[in-house]
């Protein structure tokens, strides 16, 4: 019994160590990202006029609200699949990513008109449509990102039980 429990703790130690490292890197990336965003907001607030800074805030808020579900639309399912299912699902996932990206582009482009009308500022339309074009770049990297997350077994963090 003593040997069995010793072997069990020997197996659990590397798992806990890897889990701790993964959490540390994920947490530090989140913190660093937030610090960079805060610093850039402060710098932009000093460089831009209040009106332009307000426009930037409106555009970036709309972009993030639409982009958050668009980025993760297929990656969660792909990360959990086995190799055979993944290979069979990649074409459908790519098509779904393109449909989501085009829908996000159209949604943000259409959203620019009522926002410009509400703010009584027609100069808001062009930057919003320009920002919306970045949605059309997402599908080029979404499958690669999901495969990379799958390779580093990022989904194991969600299934880890101590």
Image (cartoon, helix red, strand yellow):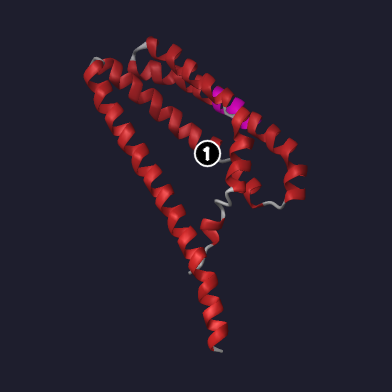
Question: What residue is at 54 percent from the left and 25 percent from the top?
Answer: 135
x, y percent for residue 112: 45, 19
- Residue 67: percent from left, percent from top: 50, 33
Query: Does residue 74 appear anywhere in the picture?
Result: no
Q: What stretch is highlighted in magenta?
A: 99-105
Vertical position of residue 96 compared to residue 119: above or below: below
Measured as percent of width and height from the top left, residue 28 is found at 37, 46
Quarter of the image for residue 122 reads: top left
Q: Pick whichever, 144 or 7, lies toward us.
A: 7
Q: Is 144 above or below relative to 10?
A: above
Determine the main secondary structure of the stretch shown in magenta.
helix
Examine the rendering and report whether any part of residue 35 can be seen: yes
Residue 21 in the image, given as x and y percentages of width and height: 44, 55
Q: Using residue 20 as the reference point, say whether residue 135 is left or right of it.
A: right
- Viewer-closest of 128 and 1: 1
Residue depicted at x 48% and y 15%: 130
Q: What element carries label 1?
A: helix
- Please identify the residue farthest to the left as the structure is shown: 46
Q: Residue at x 56, y 89 (%)?
A: 1
* Residue at screen point 56% across, 57% down: 156
Up/down of 159 relative to 33, above or below: below
Q: Left or right: 38 with respect to 8?
A: left
**Front-most of residues 2 and 144:** 2
Q: Give the left or right position of residue 42, taking residue 91 as reference.
A: left
State the residue position of label 1. Answer: 69
| Residue 119 as seen in the image, left or right of residue 20 | left
Is 100 contained in the magenta span? yes
Q: Residue furthest bottom?
A: 1
């Amino acid at each position: 019994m003593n040997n069995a429990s010793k072997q069990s703790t020997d197996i659990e130690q590397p798992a806990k160590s890897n889990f701790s490292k993964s959490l540390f890197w994920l947490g530090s990336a989140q913190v660093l990202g937030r610090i960079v965003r805060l610093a850039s907001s402060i710098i932009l607030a000093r460089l831009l006029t209040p009106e332009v800074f307000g426009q930037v805030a409106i555009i970036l808020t709309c972009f993030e609200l639409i982009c958050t579900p668009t980025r993760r639309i297929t990656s969660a399912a792909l990360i959990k699949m086995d190799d055979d299912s993944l290979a069979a699902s990649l074409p459908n996932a790519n098509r779904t990513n393109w449909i989501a990206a085009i829908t996000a582009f159209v949604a943000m482009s259409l959203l620019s008109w009522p926002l410009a009308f509400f703010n009584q500022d027609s100069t808001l339309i062009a930057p919003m449509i320009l920002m919306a074009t970045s949605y059309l770049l997402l599908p080029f990297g979404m499958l690669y990102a999901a495969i990379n997350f799958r390779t580093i077994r990022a989904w194991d963090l969600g299934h880890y039980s101590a």
